[in-house]
């Protein structure tokens, strides 16, 4: 929070008293002397701020994200009016070009006026017509809007009689004016240049990016803990998990900024699209998910995480020779019992994927069991004192593929991260920052990322109007207004291993 005055350099009376009483009480032009000292104090205050930022940059925890300047000169050229792309209609469905819409390509679609800004400007809170005793002060969000690379005014500043306007000085013709930006922020990539380059993570500067860089550094210095992995995902999406044990949820509500979850210790912000997973009165534990935007589950108990319908394993997690993905569904399927050519009991159960890949998987599983001295059928034998090969009567009738996978394969050193990009906030560093996860994980640790995309689907009829085909009717039945598609990603191998969530995923 900015406060004024911040020190003696911001007070003209204090500065005028420093040279002595002659300049403040006896000298007839004390006002001019005070103005000169005050202007010099402004320069020294900026120098002091730059020195403080340089000192703070020594630590990766306190390195400033942006450089804040006291004043910036903002020239306004009539020849550059409405030249930034932000002034033109966007191809996002908000503008419809037609003969009657009045919109044409390359022409602004509103009476507002846009002027370009330097690319490194990231915040523009106030604009003034002059530095000393301004008579016109423009406020962001009311008189103008800041977008990357441009500032959009509600009314043209060049038509304001309080703004200094004259002939353009750069030979472009027309008129030119000037405004002064108070405390604008510039992105000097300070976090990346000081510490981020070592991690190999490059992203636009933000507090979330600094958190991601610190998570990688903490893992490298002290050894990876689950908290570092959580911080990396929190930074990517711009959301937080519960910070500490014992927090009590006080209230959950929506406002103009999105979803708000209030506890007795913190206030958590989420996007409007996020779904609340907690209720007032709940006592939280550290790392607990508050919404469905980001959820962490570890397989240490061997149980299936709540709400997980299926999980796919691809080449990064399967034995060599299997090229496709196998989908383990959270549903009970019959256990198929057969015998191999040598009289050994061979079992299998239904998996999603290409039939040849599924068949090859069960052949490899049975062969590896024979080589190890105990097949899967023998491991599933329910007899108290097994002897010989088990028959169907000594084996379970059904198996839950996903529960079997969680209890027997993923139970040690594996975790699942479920995230929904549509719930990410603008404060996040972006999903590209997750490439740093590979440098965090120890070799024996697996993190599976399940990305759930919400897509709008429309029914498709592959026939003449009024006579839908079977395929068209099927698509119309399950598509609906929106569907969720989940993509599981093995972050250790960095390969997409499946697409789940479709109706035929197990069939």
Image: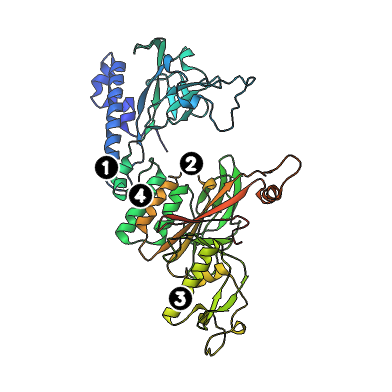
Q: Position of residue 503 (x, y in %)?
A: 63, 56
Labelled pair 3, 2 in contact (Cβ < 8 Å): no
Which residue is disc 2 drawn over?
A: 426
Seen in the image, is 351 located left or right of residue 190? right
Q: Is residue 61 left or right of residue 327?
A: left
In the rendered image, residue 310, in percent from the top left (x then y), is placed at 56, 61
Q: Nearer the viewer, mark 3 or mark 2?
A: 3
Residue pictured at 41% horizontal, 65% vertical: 320
Mark 3–mark 1 Cα distance, whole angstroms, equals 63 Å
Task: Please report whichever mark, 3 or 4, sits nearer to the chain's N-terminal start.
Answer: 4
Above or below 210: residue 71? above
Residue picked out by circle 3 = 367
Q: Give the Cα separation between the discs numbered 2 and 4.
A: 18 Å
In the drawing, what numbered circle is on residue 213?
Answer: 4
First-in-chain label (1 vs 4)? 1
Quadrant for the C terminus in the image: bottom right
């Amino acid at each position: 929070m900015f406060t004024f005055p911040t020190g003696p350099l911001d007070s003209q009376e204090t500065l005028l008293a420093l040279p002595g009483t002659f300049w403040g009480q006896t000298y007839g032009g004390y006002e001019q002397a005070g103005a000169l000292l005050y202007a010099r104090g402004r320069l020294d205050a900026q120098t002091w701020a730059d020195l403080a930022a340089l000192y703070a940059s020594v630590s990766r925890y306190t390195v400033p994200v942006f450089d804040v300047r006291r004043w910036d000169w903002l020239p306004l050229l009539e020849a550059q009016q409405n030249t930034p792309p932000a002034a033109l209609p966007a191809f996002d469905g908000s503008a419809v070009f037609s003969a009657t819409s009045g919109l044409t390509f390359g022409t602004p679609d509103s009476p507002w006026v846009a002027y370009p800004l330097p690319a490194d400007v990231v915040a523009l809170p106030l604009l003034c017509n002059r530095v000393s005793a301004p008579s016109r002060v423009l406020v962001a969000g009311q008189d103008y809007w800041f977008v990357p690379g441009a500032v959009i005014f509600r009314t043209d500043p060049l038509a304001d009689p309080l703004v200094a306007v004259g002939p353009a000085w750069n030979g472009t013709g027309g008129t030119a004016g000037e405004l002064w930006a108070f405390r604008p922020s510039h992105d000097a990539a300070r976090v990346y240049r000081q510490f981020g380059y070592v991690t190999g993570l490059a992203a636009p500067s933000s507090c979330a990016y600094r958190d991601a860089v610190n998570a990688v550094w903490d893992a490298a210095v002290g050894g990876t803990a689950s908290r570092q992995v959580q911080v990396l995902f929190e930074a990517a999406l711009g959301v937080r998990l519960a910070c500490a044990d014992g927090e009590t949820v006080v209230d959950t509500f929506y406002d103009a900024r999105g979803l708000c979850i209030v506890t007795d210790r913190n206030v958590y912000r989420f996007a409007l699209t996020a779904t609340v997973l907690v209720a007032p009165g709940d006592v939280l534990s550290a790392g607990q998910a508050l919404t469905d935007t980001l959820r962490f589950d570890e397989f240490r108990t061997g149980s299936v995480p709540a709400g997980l319908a299926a999980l796919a394993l691809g080449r990064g997690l399967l034995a060599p020779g299997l090229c496709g993905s196998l989908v383990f569904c959270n549903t009970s399927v019959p256990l198929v019992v057969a015998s191999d050519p040598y009289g050994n009991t061979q079992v299998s159960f239904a998996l999603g994927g290409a039939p040849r890949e599924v068949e090859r998987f069960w052949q490899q599983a049975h062969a590896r069991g024979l080589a190890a001295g105990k097949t899967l059928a023998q491991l599933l034998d329910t007899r108290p004192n097994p002897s010989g090969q088990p028959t169907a009567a000594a084996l379970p009738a059904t198996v839950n593929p996903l529960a079997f996978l969680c209890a027997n394969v993923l139970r040690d050193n594996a975790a699942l991260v479920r995230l929904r990009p549509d719930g990410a906030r603008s404060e996040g560093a972006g999903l590209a920052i997750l490439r740093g996860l590979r440098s965090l994980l120890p070799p024996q640790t697996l993190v599976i990322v399940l990305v759930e995309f919400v897509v709008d689907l429309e029914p498709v009829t592959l026939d003449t109007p009024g006579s839908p085909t079977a395929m068209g009717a099927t698509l119309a039945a399950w598509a609906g207004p929106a569907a969720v598609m989940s993509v599981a990603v093995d972050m250790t191998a960095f390969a997409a291993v499946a697409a789940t969530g479709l109706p035929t995923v197990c069939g």
